[in-house]
Amino acid sequence: MNSPDKLSPQLFRYPPSQKPELLNPLVLAYVGDAVYEMFIRQYVISMPSQRPNHLHRTATRYVSAKAQSRALQALLPLLTEEETNIVKRGRNAKSGSTAKNADVLEYRHSTAFETLIGYLYYKQAYERLNYIMQASLEPEKIAALTASQPEAGAASNQPGGTDTGMEKIQAGVSGGTKASESAPDRQAPSDANKL
């Protein structure tokens, strides 16, 4: 049986037609949206209350453009140069649609977040993808912990790296707060123009 934190390569058998780096960022965002939605739905179903209406409302708190934008802002200091470039491509992509319940900047950051998720999924960087998605559940903790790190840079915060900041951040995300007690709709520090 496969480890629960790994995606089975047999589950989804259709690789992209070209390397992930060459895909249109909106295509990556399209896939990233589906991957993140599935992650959030599984996360919400793992909670005690499983009434359908409650599941939907709780999931929406995480998958909304506003929540994804906040998650991306908190994660920015942890991204590698390669990931930052993918995020910028996603943010700058011209989409034919407009945001329903978010301003233009939040919508672009949300698209950038989904682009990163899609990119990591197609790169089969499952450990990193899992870390990013887990961290996105509590962006306030990530923002607070990265702000307290004097040298919380992307290069030193890679999985398997030597920086203890990563361990503190992972402990902060996984420990202490229940998902139902966290508030993804709370305002994160204002870094809206950081990208």
Image: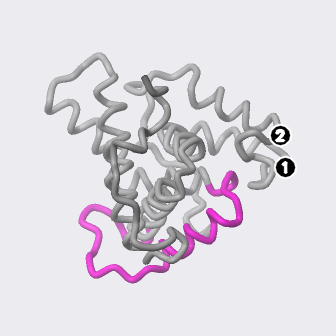
The percent position of residue 92, horizontal first and vertical second, equals: 49, 79
Quadrant, the N terminus: top left
The percent position of residue 99, horizontal first and vertical second, equals: 29, 69
CA distance separating discs 1 and 2: 9 Å
| Vertical placement of residue 119 versus 137, above or below | below
The percent position of residue 23, horizontal first and vertical second, equals: 45, 75
The percent position of residue 34, horizontal first and vertical second, equals: 32, 53
| Vertical placement of residue 86 versus 187, above or below | below
Q: Which of disc 2 and disc 1 is earlier in sequence?
A: 1
Picture mark count: 2
SS of the residue under disc 1: loop
Tag 2: residue type? Asp
| Residue at image point 85% right, 46% down | 150
Quadrant, the C terminus: bottom right
| Vertical placement of residue 67 versus 145, above or below | below
- Mark 2 — residue? 163
Task: Answer whether residue 139 is visible to the viewer in this image.
Answer: no
The range drawn in magenta is 76-105
Tag 1: residue type? Glu
Find residue 142 and report its image quarter.
top right
| Residue at image point 32% right, 30% down | 44
| Residue at image point 45% right, 43% down | 186
- Mark 1 — residue? 151
SS of the residue under disc 2: loop
**101 in the magenta segment:** yes
Task: Answer whether residue 59 is visible to the viewer in this image.
Answer: yes
| Label 2 CA crowd tier, 10 Å (few <14, some 14–19, many 20+) | some
Q: Which mark is residue 46?
A: none
CB-based contact (under 8 Å), mark 1 and mark 2: yes
